[in-house]
Image (cartoon, rainbow, N blue to C red):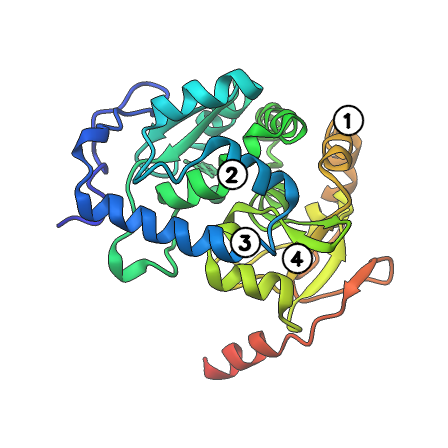
Amino acid sequence: MTRNRYAGAPRNADFTIDQRWDSYTPDEHDRWNRLYARSADMLQSRACPEFLTALATLDLSQGGIPDMAELSTRLEPLTGWRVVPVTDLVPDDIFFDHLANRRFPAGAFIRPEAEMDYLSEPDIFHDIFGHVPLLADPIYADFMQAYGRGGARALARGQLPNLARLYWYTVEFGLVRSAEGLRLFGAGIMSSVAESRFALDAPDPHRIGFDLERVMRTDYIIDDFQQTYFVIDSFADLLAACSGDFGDLYDRLARMPDVQPHETLPGDFLFTRGTLAHFRDRAAAG
Ligand code: HBI
Ligand code: FE
């Protein structure tokens, strides 16, 4: 059984494919249901209110893997967003063009049983359970479109790495303040039970107040929990921070050294200064 049976599927110029929803097996539908139940349950006390509201609104627990076309008929009236099937990662320019047109490209394959707890690239559970619910929130929906438009500009300037960090530390691994304390919103956290605990509860990582320039300077690791999580005040604040022209910012960034993910800077607003113990153990283990 190949791992991603959509790899090599015939695709359109925009890299979309036919999801062939009828081809999912009962086992795959059951795996979605188990992934969904496990994460939705433990996120009740950890996810931000906007995510929980959107998750209930979109009701992804309708029994098995969502049909993206059907899901889009329910999402589009809310914020204009649709979900389109792709095989896996698509080229940056294609990705940004989809976001700029309120289309979220979601992987069509579901992770194999052996990778229930961690997988390296986005499967349909990461993309639809992790990313799609917040697209039902009007402010976050506007932010994601603004990000797509900014992506094309960053590509044109050759400064995509700076913008990719913004995506990484918010859309994938962001935390947000709420009346009850820090809460999760990043899709990479939401779709991982272990990281949903680590990001909020563990003493190991730093938790630093979001600052656009600081985030865009900060490198990241892709094969372990984050050493630093950034905390936004609100989605409105994130949208406002990203709605200006980044030209001067890119000029400044080009002259500044990168910040390593384990570092803190004098100007940081530290919600928690991490022990980094998890990462030292990992480094020691080699
Ligand atoms: N493609 N399908 C898919 N999903 C992504 O999250 C994605 C992508 N291509 C490029 C990309 N992300 C990154 O370049 C951005 O995160 C910056
Ligand atoms: Fe993602």
> Which of these two is toward me, 279 or 175?
175
Whole-number angstrom distance, CA of label 4 to CA of label 3? 17 Å
Mark 1 Cα shell of 10 Å, populated few (<14), some (14-19), many (≥20): few
Residue depth check, mark 4 versus mark 1: number of the one nearer the observer: 4
Q: Earlier in the sequence, mark 1 or mark 3?
A: 3
Q: Which mark is nearer the camera, 4 or 2? A: 2
Q: CA distance from mark 1 to mark 3?
A: 33 Å
Sequence-first tag of 4 and 3: 3
Of the image marks 4 and 1, the number of the one nearer the N terminus: 4
Most foreground residue, 233 or 259: 233
Element type at mark 3: helix
Secondary element at tag 4: strand
Instruction: Between label 2 and label 1, give the one nearer the viewer.
Output: 2
Q: Are marks 4 and 1 in contact (CB under 8 Å)?
A: no
Residue beneath label 1, please? 244
Q: Which mark is residue 43?
A: 3
Task: Say which residue label 4 marks.
Answer: 229
Residue type marked 3: Leu
Residue 10, position as x, y percentages in the image: 21, 25
